[in-house]
Image (cartoon, rainbow, N blue to C red):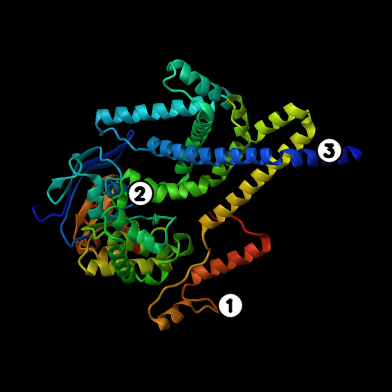
Amino acid sequence: MSDAILEVRHLSKTFGSNQVLKDIDFTVRPGDVTSIIGASGSGKSTLLRCINLLETPTSGEIIFHGESVTGGKVNPNAYRTKVGMVFQSFNLFNNMTVLQNCMVGQTKVLKKNAQEARANAMKYLEQVGMAPYINAKPRQISGGQKQRVAIARALAMEPEVLLFDEPTSALDPEMVGEVLEVMRSLADGGMTMLVVTHEMAFARDVSNHVVYMSEGVICEEGAPKEVFSNPKQQRTREFLSRFREN
Amino acid sequence: MDKFAELGADIALLWGTYASRYLNGILNTLILAVTATLVGCLIGFLCGVLNTIPHSRQDHAVKRFFLKLLRVIVRVYVEVFRGTPMVLQAVFIYYGLPYFTDNAVAFRGIPGIWAASLIVVSINTGAYMAESVRGGIISIDPGQTDGAKAIGMNHFQTMTSVILPQAIRNILPQIGNNFIINIKDTSVMFIIGFFDFFAQHRNIVGVNNMYFPSAAIEMIGYLCMTLTASFLLRLLEKVLDGSDSYELVQGDSLVLAAGTYSHPDRGTPFDEHSKEQRERIRQELKHGRTRGDR
């Protein structure tokens, strides 16, 4: 297990009396693209938010490079610079331009100077095809463009792991394509990614590990080929059959 | 009609004699109102930021205790200074502080009056602003905080870089409200001898008994100040909103042309957006500008 970059051990999360995650256990190795699939309300997003410490796990551990980040010894802010996150609702800073969005983390948190941050931001904006829009405000660009900027913002911090929380769920079908294309190229580039998604084609074709969650537990996990073509659990079969019909 | 003519003549007479004193009063009022509003805003922002420091059950007990204490202190401050008249606060601070501290803290002479007035109006404005800022911070989408935290910002960085700039824009009308209220309400500082616009009126009519003409001058004077303030605040809002359009940046001029070519009826590769934009502009031209899409 020493080669694991991120380990989730016996993670549970309760909101009041509602147990959202029960004893979640899985491992992410460098270069892994893990897709987390499952019905809405099965705890996928909460799991991702727990991994980024946006929610505090009720019990269990999250281990990053062999060190527990839930024990209070690791500064969560320093940890978050290494584990980036892309949200369903983009969450671009509305008071900044596209370029500033990608620079602010570098200058304020990583303490880079403005020129370096700018060059770095431009590199990633170029990569997601948003370089022409650096002077636009988030309210002036489309959803797909916002999400691509959000990905560039996360990349500009040069994280070791990138978490995607339903990155295409708020987009119309045409824009889903442009965002998935960016994610696919990231995966090809060897980025370690953890993707909560309803895009079954992406989970099947791009990821090398699929986790199916149902009612707060990991119901089934494995290689995409295994999970998609030969699901072992009844619940997985039912869930996937609904997608095949569409 | 002749009553108005008489009033006009009296006003002219008063203004002719005492213009410099009225103007001096206006100047004092404005200096006090501007400074106190700015300081009050700072106090408000500070309270707002301190009040929203997140804490969870896993935090250390000492940290949780201090955060709780901080919130209680801010709460008491807001309730006390929002809930009592500013005239009485002025009395308590100007006369009360020297009395209770055996003159260790005392306000002497004109500078003392200025200091006491500034303190009273500032902390008063601060108490109101604390609540406004809290509202402004709450009104910002929690996703903004998530986004800031996800790139590793701490609470202070999140507040100063992301939340407050947006909150300030949202509460600017309330800051304007407070400023205008301050222009008028600094008049109660006559109780501790502050020479503002209204105090000049009391002084001048004390000499010549021309109450009504002097009051008319006061009315016009205050209205001019507040109207100017409203105008400047609107202007500031516009500046903060920034331009509605943006420039595409592209090194390669061919690519630039390819990306931005826009025939009014045909659409562009970025059709989704430009259609919306065009429709919005059309609506704005038709019905005037709305802020509903914010």
Q: Secondary structure at mark 2?
A: helix
- Name the amino acid, label 1: Asp
Q: CA distance from mark 3 to mark 2?
A: 63 Å
Mark 3 in CB contact with mark 1 (< 8 angstroms): no
Q: Nearer the viewer, residue A20 or B154?
A: B154
Q: Secondary structure at mark 1?
A: loop
Tag 1, which chain?
Answer: B
Relative to B252, is B232 on the left or the right?
A: right
Instruction: Kindly indicate whether the residues beneath marks 3 and 1 are on one polypeptide chain.
Output: yes
Foreground mark, 1 or 2, reads 2
Q: Mark 2 and mark 1 in contact (Cβ < 8 Å)?
A: no
Residue, disc 1: B265
Q: Locate the C terminus of chain A and report the quarter of the image it occupies.
A: bottom left
Q: Which residue is mark 2?
A: B146
Residue highlighted by disc 3: B7
Which chain does tag 3 point to?
B
Q: Residues within 10 Å of mark 3 (few under 14, many from 20)?
A: some
Residue B119 screen position, x and y as percent: 49, 31
Q: Is residue B65 left or right of residue A63?
A: right
